[in-house]
Amino acid sequence: PDVIVERVNGDFVVTLNESRVPHLRINQTYRHLLMDRKNTPKEVKEYIRKRLESARWLINSIHQRRITILRVMNAIVNRQREFFEKGIGHLKPMILKDIAEDVGMDISTISRVTNGKYVQTDFGVFELKYFFSEKMKTVDGEEISNRHIKDRIREIIENEDPRRPYNDQQIVELLKKEGVRIARRTVAKYREQMMIPVARLRRKI
């Protein structure tokens, strides 16, 4: 994982996985060559100066990226505190715009920073994009994430009788009993996104 979220004295602490972060330093030999007025030719000095500027830019970029990842992850923890306390069933609706507003950055920056990044939690390792999902409402007006709905559909299918698997409409009815009103075509879409086949292909004799 790129980031680690740990619970310390009742609060959550976000740290970077240092083994995944490159530690770069400028070689002092080049500094000495640059400072040597007698033995280092002018064209060599100019070349070294350009390379040092590039190295400083790279080191600064990595440092800024680390700070940004920490800020973004802390913002995610603040919005998804229940998830980090209780687990998957407590994920709240959250979009990139929410975090962008929290940390004062562009949505594109948040998207780039979270892309392909993973976090270690008490409940396992998750890709950061896992925490972003659109909201849906239960019949009681409670807002839940569509990610939670997907997880629930997966759970229903994993626990079904393999000889009599649920079709999409039956899943709709089961979710309705839990207070979640959802269309059959939406269940089908979520199922397909999770690469779960239709009922007739899941049936085992």
Image (cartoon, rainbow, N blue to C red):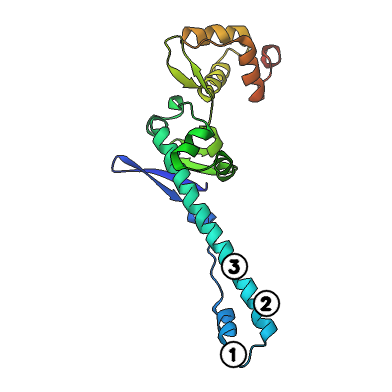
Q: Is residue 164 visible?
A: no
- Quadrant assignment for the C terminus: top right
**Residue on which the image places disc 3:** 55
Query: Upstream in the sequence, badge 3 or badge 2?
Result: 2
Residue 139 to residue 96: above or below: above
- Structural crowding at the residue carrying mark 1, measured as other residues with C-alpha within 10 Å and reported as few (<14), some (14–19) or many (≥20): few
**Numbered disc in front, either 3 or 2:** 2
Q: Are the residues at dot 3 and dot 1 in contact (C-beta closer than 8 Å)?
A: no
**Residue on which the image places disc 1:** 37
- Structural crowding at the residue carrying mark 2, measured as other residues with C-alpha within 10 Å and reported as few (<14), some (14–19) or many (≥20): few
* Residue 88, horizontal then vertical, whole percent: 46, 28
Q: Secondary structure at mark 2?
A: helix
Q: Secondary structure at mark 3?
A: helix
Residue shown at 48%/56% (left/top)? Answer: 18
**Residue on which the image places disc 2:** 47
Query: Upstream in the sequence, badge 2 or badge 1?
Result: 1
Mark 3 vs mark 2, CA separation in Å:
12 Å
Residue shown at 43%/50% (left/top)? Answer: 15
Instruction: Say which amino acid is labelled 1.
Output: Arg
Q: Within the image, what quadrant is residue 90 found in? A: top left
Residue shown at 45%/26% (left/top)? Answer: 92
Instruction: Say which amino acid is labelled 2.
Output: Tyr
